[in-house]
Image (cartoon, coloured by chain):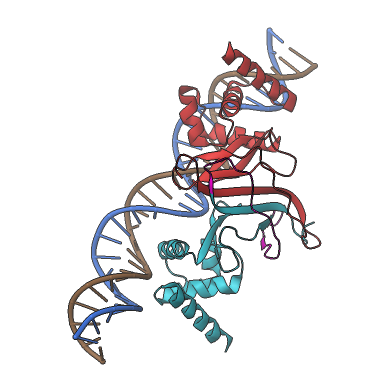
Chain colours: A red, B cyan, C blue, D brown
DNA sequence: TTAAAACTGCAACATTATTGCACTTTTTGC
DNA sequence: GCAAAAAGTGCAATAATGTTGCAGTTTTAA
């Protein structure tokens, strides 16, 4: 059964990353796996429905997941943080995100490559680079 | 006198871009010119002191300036929109912004070049690309 | 199996931004 | 210049998102 696979996968990821297998953490991780793109707290709640933990818990779990480098936090355009699994990112850079200016939908440009910025003045240490693209998606263009 | 130059410059910019020369708009534009980097509403207020218009007015002015492409809005990391003059930006891309993870200071990497992303799937129309970099600034590294 | 550690939910609160509306300033057409 | 129209502004109230403190629950580990 697909759902059990997903749950097993989530539990395994949690264990590997050193997190406890609590119900809330499993639900959230499963949903992030399903989504495959950044979700805001609110989108997550809509998807999880009844099963969604309290918003405080969601924020705290995301905070832990971010600290453990399991999840990345991106700001897109809806005045909210969006959270996504970090498994498709390399150490210093995620894939670019494309947000449609018309419908608001966000797409992960996982295949696309953008070089790290070069030529910073002495003393600047780059820890993370984020690329955000706005425009029109296929459905709206 | 330098201040008068600045004021004249601000008024000229406003006129060219088709905005009225109201006190509030002139103050804000002058301050953005002086700053030369993105400012949040709060930073702006701190710099303008007494002269700062009501926050609602600030937000509305910024909205108009953005619509008129005089100003760009960027989200950095302090949970607030930051506003900066668009005069150093080309049509589809601003310079990258560097935010220090230690002291929170933001630097405009105006000299640095990053190519536009290439290879998007058919139907995607790019309107704007934004690069955000996190790391440690010279003072903190 | 049970004590310690980790996690969760609720209520209250903080921060940033927006809306409605009355009033003021600026512009425009004479 | 001057009056009417247009544009801009401030205040109060409200919305949206995220955070803190704390008591109670679940999970882990010995």
Main secondary structure found in the magenta portion: loop
Residue sitting nearer the eye, B59 or B129: B129
Res. B104 in view: no
Magenta stretch encompasses residue A47: no
Q: Residue at x 75, y 41 (%)?
A: A91
Where, by quadrant of the figure, is residue D7 drawn? bottom left
In the rendered structure, the answer to whether residue B40 lies left or right of residue B61 reads right
| In this view, B53 is above or below B134 | below
Q: Position of residue D23 (x, y in %)?
A: 54, 28
In the rendered structure, the answer to whether residue A20 lies left or right of residue B25 reads right
Q: Which residues are magenta?
A: B100-125
Q: Position of residue B5 (x, y in %)?
A: 55, 85
Q: Position of residue B126 (x, y in %)?
A: 55, 50
| In this view, C8 is above or below B12 | above
Q: Position of residue A41 (x, y in %)?
A: 52, 36
Residue sitting nearer the eye, B47 or B21: B21
* Position of the C terminus of chain B by quadrant: bottom right
Magenta stretch encompasses residue B118: yes
Q: Residue at x 68, y 57 (%)?
A: B98
In the rendered structure, the answer to whether residue B52 lies left or right of residue A38 reads left
Residue sitting nearer the eye, B100 or B98: B98
| In this view, A22 is above or below B53 | above
Q: How many marks?
A: 0
Res. A97 in view: yes
Residue sitting nearer the eye, B4 or D23: B4
* Position of the N terminus of chain B by quadrant: bottom right
């Amino acid at each position: 059964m697909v759902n059990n696979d997903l749950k097993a996968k989530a539990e395994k990821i949690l264990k590997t990353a050193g997190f406890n297998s609590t119900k809330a953490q499993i639900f959230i991780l499963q949903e992030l796996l399903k989504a495959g793109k950044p979700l805001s707290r609110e989108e997550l709640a809509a998807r999880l429905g009844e099963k969604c933990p309290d918003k405080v818990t969601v924020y705290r779990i995301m905070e832990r997941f971010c600290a453990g480098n399991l999840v990345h936090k991106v700001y897109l355009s809806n005045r909210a943080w969006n959270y996504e699994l970090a498994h498709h990112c390399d150490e210093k850079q995620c894939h670019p995100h494309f947000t449609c200016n018309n419908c608001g939908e966000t797409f992960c440009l996982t295949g696309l490559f953008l070089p790290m910025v070069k030529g910073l003045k002495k003393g600047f240490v780059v820890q993370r680079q984020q690329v955000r693209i706005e425009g029109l998606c296929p459905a709206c263009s």
